[in-house]
Structures are given as C-alpha cells and as structure tokens.
Image (cartoon, rainbow, N blue to C red):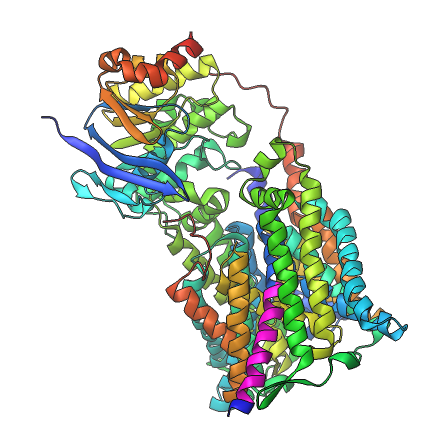
Amino acid sequence: MTSGRRAGILAGVAVLVVLAFGPWIGGFLNIDTSFLSEVLLTAIAALGVNLLLGYTGLPIFGNAALFGLGAYGAGLAIKDFHAGFAVALLVGVAAAFVGALIIAPFLLRRRNIYFGLLSLAFGQVFYFIAYRYSDVTGGEDGMAFTRPALNLGPIRGTVTETMMYYITYGLFVLAIVSFWLIVRSPFGQTLVAIKQNELRVRYLGLNTDRFILVGILIAALYGGLGGALYGLLLRFAFPLLLDWHQSGDFVLMTMLGGAGTIFGPLVGAIIFVIGKDIISTITPAWEIFLGAFFIACVLGFPKGILGSIGDAIARRRAPAEPNETAP
Amino acid sequence: MLEQLAPQIVNGLMLGAFYASVAIGLSLIMNLTGVINMAHGSFLTLGGYFSFAMVAAGAPFWVALIAAPILTALVGLALERGLMRPLYGRDPLYSLLLTFGLSLIAEEVYRLIWGSNGVPVSAPAALQGGISLGTFQVPTIQVFTAAILVVAMSALWLFLNRTRYGLRLRAAVQDTEMIAALGTNTQTLYMVNFGLGVLLAGLAGVLAASQLGLNPTSGNALLMPAFVTVIVGGMGSLLGALAGGLLIGMTISMMTLFFPAASDVSMYVIMAVILLIRPRGLFGEEGLFG
Amino acid sequence: MSDVLLSATGISKHFGGVQAVDNVSIAVERGSIHAMIGPNGAGKTTFFNTLSGFFLPDSGTVRFEDVDITREANWRRIARGLSRTFQTPSIFPDLSVYQNLLIGTQAKRGVAFRLSLPRGKERDEIEARIEELLGFVGLGAVRRRTVSELSHGMQRLVEIAMSLSTEPKLVLLDEPMAGLAEAETDRVVGVIRDLHDRLGLTVLFVEHNMRVVLGLAQRITVLDRGRLLAEGSPGEIAADDAVRDAYLGKEIIENV
C-alpha cells in the first residue's frame, strides 16, 4: 500500500472517529443533534450521486426521487402497517430500490446529458405521484407519522434525537466503508474505466449496461437509506423531497465536496446543509446566495474541495517528469 | 359534446404550441452546445414580467409582444457571454448546474421585485372574447397565441433551412470543429443560437402570462413538459419538438376533459411508452451503441 | 484451402445520401496478415465498423469462425476472439498504463463484475499476465505513468496491448500508424509483425503507408469509393493497373 493511500485511510478513520462525538461537538457549537443527523443522512444519499456522477460519469438528476421514495416508504410502513423502526428503514430502502429498478431500463438507453434529462423526467414522475395520490401520500401537505421504537433484540426503546444520531452515524460508517470497498473493487474500477472511455470498455468484452444498471441500483440503496432516515428523523415526508430542485441540491453538494472522492459527499453535505441553514436565518432571499454559490462553484471550483486538495497534493508529490524516450 | 370538445382541441393546440416553442428553444441550445438550459423556464417568466411591466407603464400589448422577447433575449445573451461561455469546452454538466443556479437566483429576484403570489395578467381587450366556429365558440386569445407561436416557429425554420447563416448553424451542430476550420466565428454562432432559443422562450412567456398565470415559478411549469417533449419528439430534431409538443399538448388537454386527475401524469406515460417502443423518439437519431 | 477466420459478404452501408460501403466482401484466412487499403473516404473505417459491431450494416453478413455475427453486440464479439484498435488510440487517458491493461485482463478472467478484490493465486496470475503484455510491447518501464502523458506512439502500443488482454484470435487495427513519427512507426510495425510471428494471431489492418503495407501484408484488399477494387498478394496489387490509377501512384509519390 502506498503511503498516500495509507494517509488517506487514516484521515478517513480520523473523520469517522470525530463524528462519533457528534452530539458533544454539536452541543459545544450550539448545533442541534437532529441537525447533525440530517447532515449525515444527506451525505449517505449523496454517495449515490457520487457513484454515478463522480465515478461512472453519468449525470443523475433523479436522486431526489429515490431519496423521497425512501422517506415515503418508511412513512407508509409506519402509518399503514405499524412497522417498527428497523422494518420501516428497510421498507424505505426497498421502495427506492424498486423505483430504480423500474426506471433503469429507460435510463440505460442513453448516456451523458440525455441520461441526465431522462433521470430528471422520471424523477418528476415520482414527484407527481407523491403529489397527486393524496389519498395515499397526503398530497401537497405531506405525510406525518410517528417515529416508532427500536426493537432489535437487546437494543430497544424509543429513539431519542441522540439515539437517532447514533443510528444515522452507524449507518453512515457502513455506507462509507461499503462505498470504499465498491470503488476499489474490480466492479468499481470498471465504472471508472467507463467514465474514461465506455466504448473501449465494451471493446474489452464487457457489457457496460450491466455495470451501469448495478451502479444505478447501488445509488438507489444509498439514496433510499438517506431518505428513510430523513423521514424517520423528521417524522414527515412531503412531495418536494422528490422534486428536481432537490436532485440539483444533491448534485451540487457532491460536486462541491468533490465528485469522485469518497468523503466528498460528506464535505458537501456539511457545507450545504449548514450553509443553507445559516443563510436562511440571515435573509429570506437565501436562494440567491444558493444560486450564486452554485455558479461560483461551477465556474471556479469544478473539482470540489476534496478534489482540488487531491490535485494539489498530487502536483506536489510528482517529481518533474523527464521527457520519455522510447525505451 | 362537440361544444365541449372544440375548446379543448383549441386549448390543446395552444398548449402544444407552447410546449413546442419551449422545446424547440431548449433543443436549439442543447443540440449545438450540449447544455440543458435549466434556466429556460426563468426566461419564459422574464418575458412575461417584462411585458407586464411595459403594459403597466402604458405601452400597448403589441409593443410588449415584440419588445419583451427582445429584452429577454438581450438578458440571455449577456448571461451567455459572461457566465456560460467559459464552460463550453467542459463537461456539459457544469453548464447545467450553472443554469440551475441562475434559475434559483431568477426565482428569488422575481419574488423580490414582483412578489411571491404572482401578478394578474389579462389578455388585451382586442383579443378577449371568442371566435364563432359554427355552433361553438373558441377563445380568441388561444387561437391568436397558437398562431403567433406557429408563425415564430416557421420563421425559425425558414432561418435555419433557407439562409446561409442558418446553414452554418445546422452544420455546426454536426461538426463544430469543421465549421470553425472553415472560418466561421463559433463564439458568435453560439451566441446567436442561444439568443434565438431565449427569444422564443420570451415570446412564449409573454403569451403564456395571460393564459397560464404569471408568478416566479410559472415558467418552470412549462419547462418539464418541454423536457418531456424533447424526449418524445427525439433529441436533435426540431420537427420532433413540434410533433411532440402537439402530441403532449393535445393529450393533456383531452385528459383534462376526460380524466382530470391523470392529466399531468399522462405526458410521462406517453414518454415511457415512446421510450419503450421507439427509444430514439419520434424523429430522433439513432444512438451509437448498436 | 486454408481456414477462413473472418468473412464478410456483400456488406453495404449508407449514411443519409452517401453510400459509404457498397457490396464489399472479404475473407481473412486464419494466421494471415491482411491489409485493407484505399484512398481517403474509400469506406475502410466504415467497413471495419461493421466487422467490429460499432454499427450494423444495411445488408450483408459477417461471419467469424463460420458463425454469423452480423447483428451481434460489439462486446459479445470480443469474447469470440475479435479485438480492435481505433484511428485515435482508444485508451483510458487518466489511468496508468498498468490500470489500462488491468481492466481488460480482469474482464477476460471474468472478475470484472466482482465486488471483491482478486487475492492470492488469482491476483498473481493477473499481475503476471499484465507483465506479459507490458513486455510484449516493451512498455514495462512506464507501467505507472498516466497514459495521457505518453507520446502518441506509446499510446498506440498501450492500445495494442489492451486489445491483446482479451486474448483475441483476430486483431483489427484501424490505421495503427496514423500520426506517428518515423521511429515510432518502425516500432509499431515491429509489434504488429510480432502479433503474427510470435503470437500466431490473425491481423487485419487498415493503412495508408504503402511502404508498410507492402512490407507487412500477405494479402491486400483495395477499396475505392466504397467499392471493392481489387484483392490479391502484394505483388499482384502493386502490378494492378486499376489500383495504380486509383491510388497507388499517388501514394508512392507521397511516400518516396
């Protein structure tokens, strides 16, 4: 293992350790614990965008739909079937998975901006379903539900905000580790190759559609998990969760933190969620700042924070290259 | 029955003309530069607000109908030159995010200037009322709107297919490098292309203000159907945008009559069906991967 | 008669109003080096594209080892033993040479779709195979270098090595010498000859450089304006008047 990789792993572990003390740090900085939970679950969902956008090179604009399906899935499981915490979570993830399974065959026929456009459109289909089928989903007003108790053998009891944080934290660690394993696996390496040159991957004998399909489904798992946690956190699901503006937010925070890096979504989520909150308390016109932020990020910071840091480190490490001659 | 049907048909034609115009504008920009203009809806709204302001200041509707789209196009050109030009060489995703950011800013600016609830816009007196077609009436404004938009789209078609500059634009869509090598100023080309797309959006916005309402997000309400129209009609085809727009407009209009609850989902159903039986869209081009 | 590895019969392809390929046939014998030449716009790359499944022909059939593959997806043809390079080297620019070869090697071994990293014996075999490929094209020294930083000629060699990673029987090379300097050309020619002499592969290549073609090919097919003009041994082609008129004369003058 190279020293660079070792340093990266250590840094990652350090971050995870720091996050374990979330509630204390939050108390110190006067930030609500539930707010920190929101940051982490948003980061989980953004990992899905990261996998498709940052690693496979596919602009996904329907991630919010998967997120929202997770929230509604959990909510419906609780409201209509009196599910416990863990089951509601699983149902939310499953709902997002099924949603992705339905739209994936359409998405697979295209690449690049058209892929993005299709994912946008299909995301909107789910938005409209949530909006229109008010009998089931509560329509525009959204759907409120209780947060059920946790009932996993020895671990049982009502889920307090602190406990909610630790559940979210635990799942975040799971998400990050699984993400790391996926991107360094042959599967993940092939996704990266697809981003570089999909045609060549096909000419190496691989059916790229299969890889992309699985990538979409994995993204749905992350998105749905984040969404289910969101629903359980707020005890509420509403249609705007699935809207393309929300999808745009996920893409922005992924790019802001650094698409193609493992902790990029976390960095992006922290800046985005906390930044949005701070700005909106200062001015009701916070969307102008959000928009300006988007633009500034896109124009000046395309690789995002971790991406730019990574580049700077790589430049410093590489010795001056001699002109290669034919050996 | 026919009394109910005729207005819906005209309404469908009008809606179709709206969707087609917006879709054509989007397509123009997408085909040449690969940019999905998420701010296209905001330009629509801007056109509406410009005309509203002009009429409120005393200008006749006809003046606003011409001046507002031009003003909108000028704003668009300024943004294109200042913000979008640096991004053309890069991944189109960046432009998409940029225009997304612009749409957020625009929405908030409209809110600050004109309020969140929108402004009431009525059609000019001369266009109110109806036209008699035999035993039933159809709203004059709708016929007028559809007619103007069709004229505008035809003018665009003529420009693209019957003028030298239009030829260069179409050639550039095929091969931008070649066109540049042959001496055309591609920067100007991109500008003109974008300007045309926004001009059409502004025009549609002026006309939509009285028909579909004018508030900070009214333009976006036309954006999604326009995207669906592009997908249904086929990427890369302006004729497809027209055909798709009509199809979707008619469907939504008919649905509103027979199955109102399903009317806004119906366009997605069409989209899904088209994608299943003819993935490239009605008039689209085949993809590369076999 | 020898065994025909790849055959195409009556291939036609048009784009809009242009008939790019018009009723062209070819039979590539197993173990031969076969060249396809013709003036620019003769339809050589288009023909290649139908052979390799980049797009489908309007009419005609393509057979590989006597199996009809005309409508088969491009990635499936690779498993059969087809392989291809492109006019502009189709590689993974931001990855290292090693990683470029890793993707194809993993694909061949059927581990590309796995979430677990290869370990132990499997990993050793993969690494050994990559070393073998690197050695064959002589790029061992630059295995860690990012491919986009390499010269055009070395990128071409990387691409050839990649096309070998899938253990093909037939390699289609589309203008392998395009854009190369003289010294690089000789090196690539050497590698192509090794594909045939050392690895026993069948090679079908498109090329403009007549010096190279006459020195390398055992059999030559000539296209002109989408149609088959002539086919035969280098001697026959060089002596063919029609070929000379259409193409050879200009080329020889250019290459002298």
Residue B95's spot in the image, x, y percent? 66, 52
Please tell me in which quadrant of the rendered image residue B196 appears.
Answer: bottom right
Residue at image location 55% in from the left, 64% down from the top: B242
Looking at the picture, tell me which residue is in the foreground, A141 or B198: B198
Work out which quarter of the rendered image holds the C terminus of chain C and state it: top left
Residue at image location 40% in from the left, 35% down from the top: C101
Q: Is residue B5 above or below residue C252?
A: below
Left or right, C4 with respect to B113, comes to left
Magenta stretch: give its range.
Answer: B4-22
Is residue A169 at all visible to an observer of this figure? no
Looking at the picture, tell me which residue is in the foreground, A224 or C79: C79
Work out which quarter of the rendered image holds the N terminus of chain C and state it: top left
Q: Does the magenta segment cover residue C100?
A: no
Q: Does the magenta segment cover residue B5?
A: yes
Is residue A94 at all visible to an observer of this figure? yes
The overriding secondary structure of the stretch rendered in magenta is helix
Residue occupying the far front of the picture = B134
Looking at the picture, tell me which residue is in the foreground, C202 or B174: B174
Q: Is residue B169 above or below residue C32?
A: below
Q: How many marks?
A: 0
Residue occupying the far top of the picture = C256
Residue B216's spot in the image, x, y percent? 75, 73
Q: Is residue C146 above or below residue B80?
A: above
Looking at the picture, tell me which residue is in the foreground, C94 or B205: B205
Residue A237's spot in the image, x, y percent? 60, 81
Left or right, A81 with respect to C132, comes to right
Residue A149's spot in the image, x, y percent? 55, 85
Residue at image location 67% in from the left, 65% down from the top: A21
